[in-house]
Image (cartoon, rainbow, N blue to C red):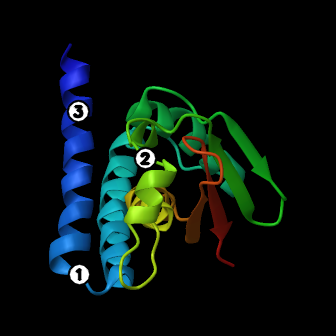
Amino acid sequence: MGREVSESCVDNLMIEMVSAYCNRFYSTKPELAARRIEAIGYQVGHQLSERYTMERPRFSDHLEAIKFICKDFWAELFKKQIDNLKTNHRGTFVLQDNRFQWLTRMSIDPSPANADLSQDSSGETAENRAVQITSMHLYFPCGIIRGALSNLGIPCAVSVDTSNLPACSFVVRIKA
């Protein structure tokens, strides 16, 4: 029962954080809101990585560190491992979660009636707005991954692909 309460608290905290940065602090500048949300995730990932690797020896290479993120780190955060890890062996890794926990509870109403009525003055449809809101919620976990890897001595850029919700793929590009 305690785990359910803490998961709902994290869900609500994330919803409120994204809402505050997108609707209040940076309502006219979504790119600044995205950067700030990602920066908060970076700090969280950096600190969690510090905590989870305190008793471990340093990783010998990038692949070993990425495997740690996919198995142990992800399991600590989401009570499951990453479903699939792919690499091109040239510094790009794709971490796939087939049911990303923070997206499974998001609801998007794709009904045609709502799409026709909900076009705003800029021509933005309800579907485009839903994609934008979903992507705002994913800057935080991208920051968590980037912060964790940074703490492990791996500077990188992290992006996300959400073409098949609630599955998502985090793309990690190691900086040379």
**Image position of 57 with respect to 76: above or below:** below
Please tell me whether mark 3 sits on a helix, a strand or a loop: helix
Q: Is residue 62 left or right of residue 25?
A: right
Front: mark 2 or 3? 2
Pointers 2 and 3 in contact (CB under 8 A)?
A: no
The tag earlier along the polypeptide, 2 or 3, is 3
The secondary structure type at the circle numbered 1 is: loop
Q: Is residue 84 visible?
A: yes
| Residue 39 screen position, x and y as percent | 34, 71
Q: Earlier in the sequence, mark 1 or mark 3?
A: 3
Residue picked out by circle 2: 109
On the image, the x and y values in percent for residue 17 come to 21, 59
Q: Pinpoint residue 82: horizontal percent, then vertical percent.
A: 60, 36
Q: How far apart are the alpha carbons under marks 2 and 1?
A: 25 Å
Q: Amino acid at mark 3?
A: Ser
Q: Which badge, 2 or 1, is on the more N-terminal residue?
A: 1
Front position among marks 2 and 1: 2
Q: Quadrant of the C terminus?
A: bottom right
Name the element at disc 2. Answer: loop
Q: Image height check: is 167 above or below 171?
A: above
Q: Amino acid at mark 1?
A: Tyr
Q: Residues within 10 Å of mark 1 (few under 14, many from 20)?
A: some
**Where is mark 1, residue-wise?**
26
Residue that carries the numbered disc 3 in the rendered image: 8
Looking at the rendered structure, which numbered label has been put on residue 4?
none
Closer-to-camera residue (151/22): 22
